[in-house]
Amino acid sequence: MKIKKTLLIISSAVLIMACATNPFTGKKTMALVSNSQLFPTSFAQYNDFLSEHKVVKGTKDAEMITRVGQRIAVAAERWLNANGNHGYLKDYKWEYNLVDDKTVNAWCMPGGKIVFYTGILPIAKNETGVAAIMGHEVAHALANHGQQRMSAGMLQQVGAVAGNVVIKDEEKRNVFNQAYGVGSTVGVMLPFSRSHETEADQIGLYLMAVAGYNPDEAAELWKRMKASSGGQTPPEFLSTHPSNETRISNLTKWAPKAKEEARKFGVTSFR
């Protein structure tokens, strides 16, 4: 019992001391790793990635990725400043690169380092589709989702260690490890990841609208994503992402609100 209480006290103290505030929702989030620790590692990993892959330079597509990224970054700064978060992006070092790879993916690392794969461009279809993807990926970085996932992973490990310390019987310990692995993943980590995706969808929609891109096109993008998957996706509760149907429904519902938000910044027409 002493061990349980000690672990509980330590875990509680860590959570109280290691919190950050999401500038978009105002909610407290886990921050067991600070951005001052995370960003340098992120920048180094990004450079390593670029050195090992074929970066596309000087083409219309590469120029489009940079153009859209810069517009989304400006929109993010305008929105953050307008909502009392001046200087939030001071440590961000924005960079946008198109990589020659058939993978249907794009990502933004903590601190603003972005990669688009050429494989996602046919689904993006046009600049507005790229903006929908860019807004979503940038939103992950701005909301510190990488920081939160690392923190959650650390807590998941703490829980596993605590169980193995407390349970002395080997057979019971094996049962615990199996149950904890499945339970903490399906019941905690996957829903946590899906909540991040949903949050990034909404924030990204607002960013693309403030940047002057039509938020109605985000739902159309996900219809194309759904068609490209051929229906080969896992059930939502076993996935890190919401289902395509859920995303399309949410984005359709949020688009008018995104346009309303954009009007606050003088944006009344959209690309």
Image (tube, helix red, strand yellow):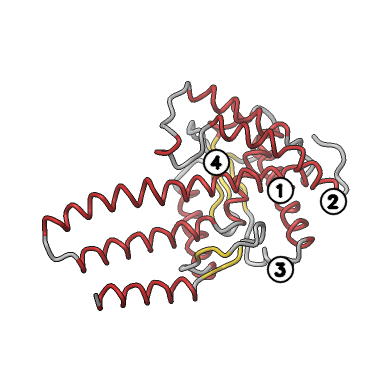
Query: Measured from the top left, where is residue 233 in percent x and y?
Result: 44, 29
Q: Residue at x 26, y 65 (%)?
A: 161
Q: Nearer the viewer, residue 86 or 252?
A: 252
Residue in the image at 48% along x and 33% along y: 103
> Mark 3 sits on what residue?
87
**Cα–Cα span, label 1 and label 3:** 17 Å
10 Å neighbourhood of mark 4: few (<14), some, or many (≥20)?
Answer: many
Q: Is residue 219 left or right of 227 when viewed as pictured? A: right
Question: Label 2 near label 3: C-beta < 8 Å?
Answer: no
How far apart marks 4 and 1 lie (CA) works out to 15 Å
Vertical comparison of 173 with 103: above or below: below
The residue that label 1 is drawn on is 72
Q: Position of residue 140 (x, y in %)?
A: 57, 51
**How dense is the environment of label 3, judged by Cα within 10 Å: few (below 14), some, or many (20 and up)?**
few
Label located before the other in sequence (3 or 2): 3
N-terminal of the pair, mark 2 or mark 4, is: 4
**Identity, as a three-letter code, of the amino acid under mark 4:** Ala
Mark 3 secondary-structure assignment: loop
Left or right: where 162 falls relative to 102: left
Q: What residue sits right under mark 2 in the picture?
A: 265
The span from disc 2 to disc 4 (Cα, nearest Å) is: 27 Å
Q: Position of residue 73 (x, y in %)?
A: 70, 52
Instruction: State the residue in front, 4 or 80.
Output: 4
Residue 204 figure quarter? top right
Q: Which mark is residue 106?
A: 4
Please, what is the three-letter code of the amino acid marked with disc 2?
Phe
Q: Tell me what residue is drawn at x 42 percent, y 73 percent.
A: 12
